[in-house]
Amino acid sequence: MIVMKFGGTSVGSADRIRGLVDQVEERLLQRPVVVVSALAGVTDLLIRGAGLARDRDPQLAPLVSRLADRHQDMIRELFGPGPFRDRLLRHVADLMTELGSLYAAVSAARELTPRNLDAIAGIGERLSFEIVAAALEAGDIATRAVDARRLIVTDESFGRAVPLMDATAQRVRELLRPLASQGVVPVIPGFIGATPEGVVTTLGRGGSDWSASIIGAALPAAAIEIWSDVDGIMTLDPKVAPGATLIPAIGFEEASELARFGAKVLHPATLQPAVQAGIAVWVLNSFNPAAPGTRIDVQPEDAASEPRGIALRKEVCLVLIAPPRRSGDGFRARVFDAFARHDTPVDLLASSEAWLSLTVSDATRLPDVVAELAAVGEVQVLQRMATVTVVGRGFARRPGAGKRMLASVDNLHVLMIAGGSSAESLSLVVPVEQVEEAARRLHREFFEQEAREDPQGEPPEACAVAAWGA
Ligand code: ADP
Ligand code: ASP
Ligand code: MG
């Protein structure tokens, strides 16, 4: 068995869905399990609609019509008059009614809870997976649409639910293995799951990749294929640097680090289940299926240590905390405790004698953290920051690595340089409007010229140097 996950653009048009049918057909001997995202842009629209509903904005009605039209048009383009078309149009009508009720409840309460938002955001995948399943069926491929709410059991952290792996694995095996062994292709909506009580949850934005690897690890599958709109994992987002090149093979750690620091091509949690189950993950291009893609696997111990890629993350907050004059050992513990208690992960950390500097990319609960930190020390929050991260095994330990990074962004405003959780990466924090330029310059330095000799004889730089304040 293999898992094939198709992202938003890979199911974004009737043509793409026809391509998907071909790609699945080619792999029928490998007994594929198909996981699909919502049509490109639909999750964004659903979430925008939720805000409009809360604000009782009249723009909601046209947005809902747009959503319905988008799916109905695609169905009419894919299926001539007949039972497939009728069934799917009914399915869309039913889900639009459900969406209408969800929006009405939000408008009535004038409040958007994370639980309501998940129910709304998950409609996109519930719309798309039935269309994809019908397209496969119409292409004479034995198919079964299986709702992920019956498969992926999660906790109740709405908006970023965590799968309960034992319960999920049991359901995946019970429901999917018999289908695959009968030669039936299961088609499953990504992104969503449900609590043990059956309340719909989502795995966080971009979470369909994670759905695929959770299912792949539970089966277990021989390979997990992530079909997207790029040739594979590139040295930098090709939308930022058109000169970015394909990384044909990469280790789990390096790929995870790229994802963790913003390379959107993979949801950051995707590789965890695959690593544990020892399953290779491929990133492939549904617009260019003949391209070899990127293979993510265990990296050989002797693999060369060199920069592998660059990731950037926008919308980051930099939090600076100065301890009171006579702070005891408890200062740091209190700081980290405040972040942990408000469920706000810290991405990067640098410290100097005077300040502790931290970056946060999920700032939803940052105001609560800051309110609490006010009792611990002096706090400053700098918004509209971004991180740019060079990833490569052992990169952060290489002599001169940080110096080379800083030199290539010399007249940009670098507020902090810090090593990642391991020696896999080194990051710079810059204002968001400078981050693409910083990424391009780093790309030129590390990927677009002959690798320069590292300066010899210099001591390794500290991994966490607070260099902010310029
Ligand atoms: P999907 O809908 O298929 O899940 P996403 O939009 O989530 O696709 O992810 C694919 C996008 O990720 C690409 O179009 C590209 O702009 C972006 N991306 C960011 N970093 C990288 C990278 N290092 N390599 C390839 N793509 C990247
Ligand atoms: N449709 C969801 C999103 O846009 C999940 C995904 O595409 O992976 O976030
Ligand atoms: Mg994605």
Image (cartoon, grey):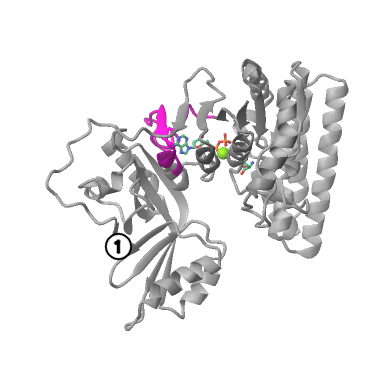
- Mark 1 vs ligand 1: CB below 8 Å: no
Of all residues shown, which one is farthest toward the bottom?
Answer: 326
Residue 253 among those drawn in magenta: yes
Q: Quadrant of residue 23?
A: top right
Vertical side of 138 occupied by 11: above or below? below
421 left or right, relative to 165? left
| Image coords of residue 221 (percent x, y) | 60, 30
Q: Quadrant of residue 75?
A: top right
Determine the secondary structure under disc 1. loop
Question: Circle 1 sits on which residue?
Answer: 466
Vertical side of 138 occupied by 406: above or below? below
| Image coords of residue 244 (percent x, y) | 38, 31
**Kind of residue at disc 1:** Ala
Of all residues shown, which one is farthest toward the left?
Answer: 457
| Image coords of residue 362 (percent x, y) | 52, 57
Q: Is residue 15 visible from the viewing direction of this image? A: yes
Q: Image point 50% across, 67% down: which residue?
A: 339
Q: Is residue 132 visible from the viewing direction of this image? A: no
Residue 254 among those drawn in magenta: yes
Give the quadrant of the N terminus. Answer: top right
Q: How many labels were placed on the picture?
A: 1
| Image coords of residue 105 (percent x, y) | 81, 58
227 left or right, relative to 469? right
Give the quadrant of the C terminus. Answer: bottom left
User: Majority secondary structure of the magenta segment?
Assistant: loop
Q: Nearer the viewer, residue 466 or 441?
A: 466
Q: Image point 70% across, 54% down: which residue?
A: 117
Residue range highlighted in magenta = 229-256
Q: Nearer the viewer, residue 192 or 82?
A: 192
Instruction: Count neighbours of disc 1 (C-alpha within 10 A) and say few if under 14, some if 14 to 19, many if 20 or more.
Output: many
